[in-house]
Image: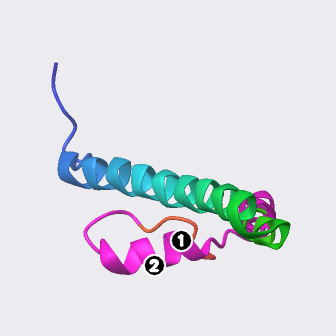
C-alpha cells in the first residue's frame, strides 16, 4: 500500500493526540463539576453547563477555547476549531 506524499503521518498523529487531549480536558471538567457539586453545592454544576453550551455552539461558531489553547501548545498539528 502506497502512502500519498500529501499526507503527513506525523501531522495526523498530532491531530489524533489533540482530539484526545480535548476530550480528556472536557471530560475532566464535567467530572470535576459533578464531584464538586456533590461535595460542596449545586452551584458547581454551572461549570458543566458552560462546557455543554460551548460544545453545542462550537460547530456553529468554529471556536473552542480548549482547541485554541491546544493549537498554541501543539503548533506542528493542524489547527482545529480556530474560528476560520
Magenta region, main secondary structure:
helix
**Is residue 51 shown above or below 7?**
below
The answer to the question of whether label 1 and label 2 lie on touching residues, with beta carbons closer than 8 A, is: yes
Q: Please provide percent x and percent y for residue 18.
A: 38, 57
Question: Residue 36, percent across and down?
Answer: 66, 65
Question: Looking at the picture, how far across and down is residue 11, in whole percent?
Answer: 26, 55
Q: Mark 1 points at which residue?
A: 66
Q: In which quarter of the image is residue 56?
A: bottom right
Q: In this view, does 57 lie to the left or right of 71?
A: right
Dot 1: element: helix
Residue at 59%, 61% in the rendered image: 32
**Quarter of the image that includes the N terminus:** top left
The label on residue 34 is none
Range of residues picked out in magenta: 49-78
x%, y% of residue 33?
Answer: 67, 62
Pointer 2 residue:
69
The quarter holding residue 26 reads bottom right
Q: Residue furthest top?
A: 1
Amino acid at each position: 500500500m502506497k502512502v500519498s506524499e500529501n499526507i503527513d503521518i506525523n501531522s495526523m498523529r498530532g491531530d489524533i493526540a489533540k482530539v484526545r487531549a480535548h476530550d480528556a480536558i472536557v471530560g475532566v471538567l464535567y467530572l470535576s463539576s459533578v464531584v464538586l457539586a456533590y461535595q460542596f453545592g449545586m452551584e458547581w454544576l454551572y461549570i458543566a453547563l458552560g462546557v455543554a453550551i460551548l460544545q453545542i455552539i462550537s460547530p456553529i461558531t468554529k471556536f473552542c477555547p480548549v482547541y485554541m489553547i491546544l493549537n498554541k501548545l501543539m503548533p506542528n498539528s493542524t489547527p482545529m476549531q480556530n474560528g476560520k
